[in-house]
Amino acid sequence: MEVSKLPISATQRGKLISAGYTSLSSICSASSSDISRGTQTAWDMLQEEQESLARITTSCADLDNILGGGIGCREVTEIGGVPGIGKTQLGIQLAVNVQIPVEFGGLGGKAIYIDTEGSFMVERALQIAEACVEDMLEYNRFLRNDCQVKTQPKDILENIFYFRICSYTEQSAVINYLDKFVSEHKDVKVVIIDSIAFHFRHGFVDLALRTRVLSGIALKLMNLAKKFSLAVVLLNQVTTKYTEGSFQLCLALGDSWSHCCTNRLILYWNSNERHAYIDKSPYLRSASASYSVTSRGIRNSTSRSKRIKMMI
Amino acid sequence: MKLLDVELSEVRSALALVSEIVCPPFQTALLLMEQRAATEHLGGHLPTRLKGLDAALCGGVPFGVVTELVGPAGTGKTQFCLKLSLLAALPAHYGGLDGGVIYIDVESTFTSRRMIEMGASSFPEIFHSKGMAQEMAGRILVLQPTSLSEFTESLEKIKVSLLQNQVKLLVIDSMAALVPGSLAEFSRIPIVVTNRVRPQSHDESCLYPFQVQKMDRILKDRTRYYSHIVAVPGFHWAHAVTIRLVLEAKSGQRFMKVEKSPTSPPLAFPFTITPSGLSLLTDDGTEMVVPETCNLSSR
């Protein structure tokens, strides 16, 4: 039966015809996925998620355990903490670890490091890269593998793309430019922004504008992560918030920002040790683990009374 | 889109092009390292002549970032600043940066007499030759702002002098207002800042919500400490600093602790104040358990 003969209003008829449905049979055969373009079934997504099982190790076994193996690709992870807790150290460690070759369980990719505070020290990156190569050689010897360790610390430094950002305009510009950059350098597997909060905390009078700009940035980063299957790591600062009758520590940039990331990790001090706590994640359990910062980078903490605490 | 009357796709491509132009050029970390090693003094560091400290900081006070000196009154912050200004003014073959120094003296503690004494005591061969003392002292420009607005004005003037006067070090003693970190990066010189501390408050403002349940245990330890993590003027400033050196005095002994540094574990060096400035009693720092470094005891 023709659509023009159906007992429906003229506007609805017009819409159906302009969409290309001219007969009743064509309407009946349209499936839900045809009508809503750009959707996927949960089953297809599961297949996709299982393919991208690769995670970036943090070189600390306890931390990797609570993170389900490491920092995941196709998602945005926010890491925040007080000054001096090791956020930049973790950022540099991830920029080095993403380059671990596939034969050693890594991703064999490159890293983009966007520095807004000037805290990236090249000498430290060299130290961590040297320790990483030594660890790989050790692992090789231990397992008596045949695969050669061909990477040198200088090669690792060569694969870290460094951007130094001095204002929030440059920050928005670099995030817009990342799409083109990553299409040209397809083996980039992690984007680290240290820190996302710096330029948005002073000089921004219009807070509503700030919230809009930040949500725009979060959306672009999320799209970038999904499109190129890479991990986005955002390092954040802390501030105090007045809740429940007292001031408490919380991550900067406000409540609306706290919804924008997929996972949230808070680094804090607990009786002389550094700990990491999973504050928000759609699939990771709330837990905390201890880690330490050594001259070789982020490693397991060596205290005797450590254990992973599950928090309910 | 409505105002410009152009297609969405044109707007998108315009945005992409503008972003590409505005975005600063990228460098690989390797290139960064090689460039700095080739063009800058000691790969971008001002040696402090305190061997243990220089080893911990990979060469000395780094260029292009803010280094903060924190401590209660009378521990030696101004002495350290005076010595650093001297070191930056020295000619290159004596290990200095051979350049000008801008010293912003907020608390009026700058004494040229003490600085000349330090110079004569540490580098007698330079300072006793004619005219050298005058030239060295002449390279140090001292600004004494008396109000916040004057301070911000002088910051603007500094940007001009940096290019005119070949300034190689900026010292701010002590922090009264926030210094944008971009000043450090744009000029690639070391910036040293001193700061004050305030007594640590044992309340929830240093805890996250998920830690609050364990408050009672923490409150039992009521020893009186200073904390610089919540020092003047707060967290926001603390994040902008790259290296933090904490000075404290405990039962007659003075200690300099490298509390926040991307390249060194937390180390404490005992030091004394001598006619030639500061000198370390030992070059091997004792590794501290952080956050012991965060708790400063008053004399």
Image (cartoon, coloured by chain):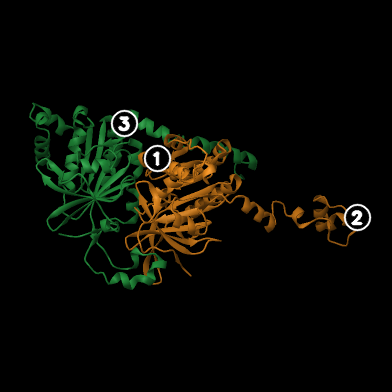
Chain colours: A orange, B green
Q: Is residue A3 left or right of residue A287?
A: right
Which label lies toward us, 3 or 2? 3
Q: Quadrant of the N terminus of chain A?
A: bottom right
Mark 3 chain: B
Q: Amino acid at mark 2?
A: Glu
Q: CA distance from mark 1 to mark 2?
A: 73 Å
Nearer the observer, B267 or B93: B267
Residue B40 shows which numbered tag?
Answer: 3
Mark 2 chain: A
| SS at badge 3 | loop
Which label lies toward us, 1 or 3? 1
Write down the residue under mark 2: A2
Q: Is residue A200 visible?
A: yes
Write down the residue under mark 1: A130
Q: Amino acid at mark 3?
A: Glu
Residue plotted at (38% across, 52% down): A86
Residue plotted at (91% across, 58% down): A5
Residue plotted at (23% across, 57% down): B197
